Amino acid sequence: MIDLRRATDLWRRCDIVVRDLPFGLLLAVASLLPALHGKGTQVGDLPTRPFDALTFAVIALECLPLAVRRRWPAVCLALVSLGFVLDQLHAYHVLASNAMPIALISAGAHLERHRRVTLALLSMAYVSLAFALGRLGAPEKVEGYVVFYLALALAWGIGTWLRSTRAAEAEHRRHVAEATRAAERTRIARELHDVVTHHVTAMVVQAEAARYLTAAPDRLDATLNAVTDTGRRAITDLRHMLDLLKADHDADVGMPSAGELRTLVEQTRQAGQPVEFTEEGSPAESAGSAEFVTYRVVQEALTNALKYAHGSPTVVRVRYGEKEISVEVSTGGPGSRAVSPGGSGRGLAGLRERVDALGGEFSADRKAGGGFVVRARIPAGSPS
């Protein structure tokens, strides 16, 4: 089996002319067999003549050009047509004359330019052949010539259909590739937004808080250390994102999961945000992508809490069920807006897309007394 696969791969690497040559050679050899004499395609119904020296040239003209039927379809069609005309005029009716419909199919499928001119020339040549056969005493009636012409036209039509099908498949593949690239760019943009926004927001909040701690060296040192740690985590996450862009990366390695929520909450607390965290149950083994999306929902909600409700009590509740994960993040009030960098709303839109992709539900609303609440219901069992 290994040798067969290697032979197949080697054959596929060969030039297209080399791969198309064996069929023409096989047809030529078969045409020389006495048992197959007179078994070819014929028009005019002239009595079959025995072989002579010209027969071998006719067979070569009809068979050997098939080697270039995909590389140079016009050349192949012209040579095969010449051999076919000679074959019919001399009434050899060799098996090689069956190359004519094959050449027509190949030309219909692979000829790129002057297709209408080619059809006009072939039609004129066929009419001339019909008149020539008539003068040689061929008993074929007009209806027979018309039927044969339609059969040749059908061969061309088959090639044209193959050409259009191949073009449609290429266009479909192009659209799929473009859609895939667009989806990948969107995914990368979402990941970068989640990683950069969360860490940078925490660093800005911590740095702003440090301005008011100059009279408390111990607290100032702790705050600056927290800024440094957050910056290092941001660099680590960005490096991980860049690693994911490599062709040979493992998409599952290092991806955040719901199990890291406690670390995320603790980081947010270090940034000065009071967070109450409640976790019920444990993730199912088949949670897969649901864990990752859960992490991102909590991360974006806590980022917005730092931005728009800094200092306000924030509650994070995560409940793991057998079939879904429920998330709710809420803040108690507007908090201090003085240190919050502006937002574009892209994060919530990205979360909604992620949750919708898994068939879940997502909402982000303002609370009547101030603050906001983010809720998500994420179906589990979607492997990442």
Image: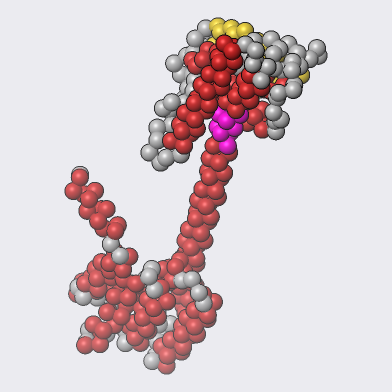
Residue 62 as seen in the image, left or right of residue 303: left
Protein image colouring: secondary structure
Residue 340 as seen in the image, left or right of residue 370: left
Residue 133 quadrant: bottom left
Residue 87 quadrant: bottom left
Q: State whether residue 128 is above or below residue 345.
A: below
Residue 168 as seen in the image, left or right of residue 327: left
**Foreground: 108 or 250?**
250
Q: State whether residue 107 is above or below residue 307.
A: below
Residue located farthest toward the right when viewing the structure as drawn: 368
Task: Look at the image and tell me whether residue 4 can be seen.
Answer: yes
**Foreground: 316 or 149?**
316
**Foreground: 117 or 131?**
117
What residue do we see at 59% from left, 32% from top?
193
Residue 269 as seen in the image, left or right of residue 74: right
The answer to whether residue 215 is magenta is: no
Looking at the rendering, the stretch of residues picked out in magenta corresponds to 189-197
Q: State whether residue 138 is above or below residue 282.
A: below
x, y percentage for residue 297? 60, 22
What residue do we see at 41% from left, 27% from top?
253
Residue located farthest toward the bottom when viewing the structure as drawn: 135
Q: Which quadrant would the N terminus be assigned to in this image?
A: top left
The answer to whether residue 193 is magenta is: yes
Task: Look at the image and tell me whether residue 96 can be seen.
Answer: no
**Foreground: 261 or 209?**
209
What residue do we see at 53% from left, 45% from top?
181
Residue 135 quadrant: bottom left
How would you classify the magenta stretch by its main secondary structure? helix
x, y percentage for residue 244? 45, 35
x, y percentage for residue 352? 64, 28
